Image (cartoon, rainbow, N blue to C red):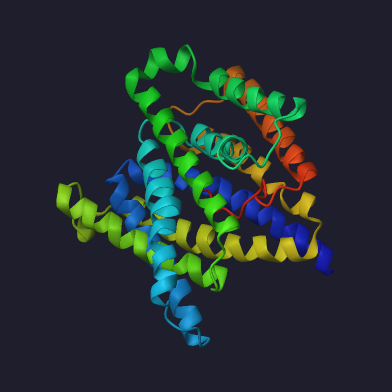
Amino acid sequence: MSSQKKAYLALTITSVVWGTTWVASKMGVKHMPAFELASIRQFLGGSIYVIFFLIKGEKLPTGKQLLWLFPLAFLMFVSANGIATYGLQFITSGLAALIAALYPLSVVLIERFYFKAIKINAPTLIGLLLGLIGIGFIFYKDSLQVHGANYLLGVGLSMFAMFSWSVGSILIARNKINMNPYNSIGWQMLISAVCMAVFTLSTGDYIPLNAIPAISWASIIYMVIGGSIFAFVSFIYSMKHLHPAIASLYAYINPIVAIWVGSLLVEGEEITWNSIIGTICTLFGVYLVNRSLKKQKDPVEAVADADGM
């Protein structure tokens, strides 16, 4: 098999696995507290990364590096991943994945109004509006009537998680630390795991490890091995051997995979015309915003490296 064929296979793996991690997370939180699940997931994933790089001879983070790792861990994994996982209790996995895909839109707003680095032209404005309209199509009316206030709470938590991911992405792009980025991710995972473990223990919202059901353990193992390792390695390979515009297609495929697989495996996650129209509007809006950012050559890329939050 040629390198290009392997790269397309890697892109397929990335798109499918990262899309299905949302469904796995949804299935996991049905049987255990969300922050406990997120903590265990990040501890296992972070441990694998950190041990791997220590074996390769990487040094422990310096004090200056830790000063950056702690806020990044809070933004990218405690606030973004942890809260997104908690929000999955109230909304569908497909909607959660779609909201996560909106982060380029919030990057535009932050860059424009805080850093004054981006001009909001017509395509950008249309993309922003389409993204919001698309989300509205999915949860408005029927979803509010069926699920009540908790559904709106889940949407709000997911939006907040997406915003946190955007802020963290901007900080990483604008303030690079002298550290292997993948080693940095491992330490961020470990730090976030400890923070969320302390939170769950202090609130009492946890269950003993031996009481965690098999389905939740299966979800965690899948997210760690599939999402944090296998799909991430596939993503790196596709980025090295495919044009960036092609390699970034995973960001548009993930929500579609999450919606479709969720409709098959999770009770109550039916595909409706609202979800189809909303998904098309949102992803086209994100595409317009990404295209606008690339043309303006802003230092913060529209498509960041993400494993479903």
Left or right, 2 with reference to 261: right
Left or right, 40 with reference to 24: left
Q: Quadrant of the N terminus?
A: bottom right
Q: Position of residue 246 (x, y in %)?
A: 78, 51
Q: Is residue 283 above or below residue 13?
A: above
Answer with the quarter of the image where residue 69 lies. Answer: bottom left
The front one of 111 and 191 is 111
- Residue at the image point whose x is 45% and y is 73% from the top: 48
Q: Is residue 224 above or below residue 160?
A: below
The front one of 118 and 59 is 118
Q: Position of residue 293 (x, y in %)?
A: 72, 41
Count all numbered tags in the image, as a single digit: 0
Can residue 152 be seen by looking at this rendering? yes
Answer with the quarter of the image where residue 29 lies. Answer: top left
- Residue at the image point whose x is 25% and y is 57% from the top: 197
Answer with the quarter of the image where residue 34 lies. Answer: top left
Q: Position of residue 299 (x, y in %)?
A: 68, 52
- Residue at the image point whose x is 27% and y is 46% from the top: 33
The front one of 35 and 303 is 303
Determine the residue located farthest toward the front in the rendered image: 116
- Residue at the image point whose x is 46% and y is 32% from the top: 92
Q: Position of residue 84 (x, y in %)?
A: 42, 42
The front one of 305 and 52 is 305
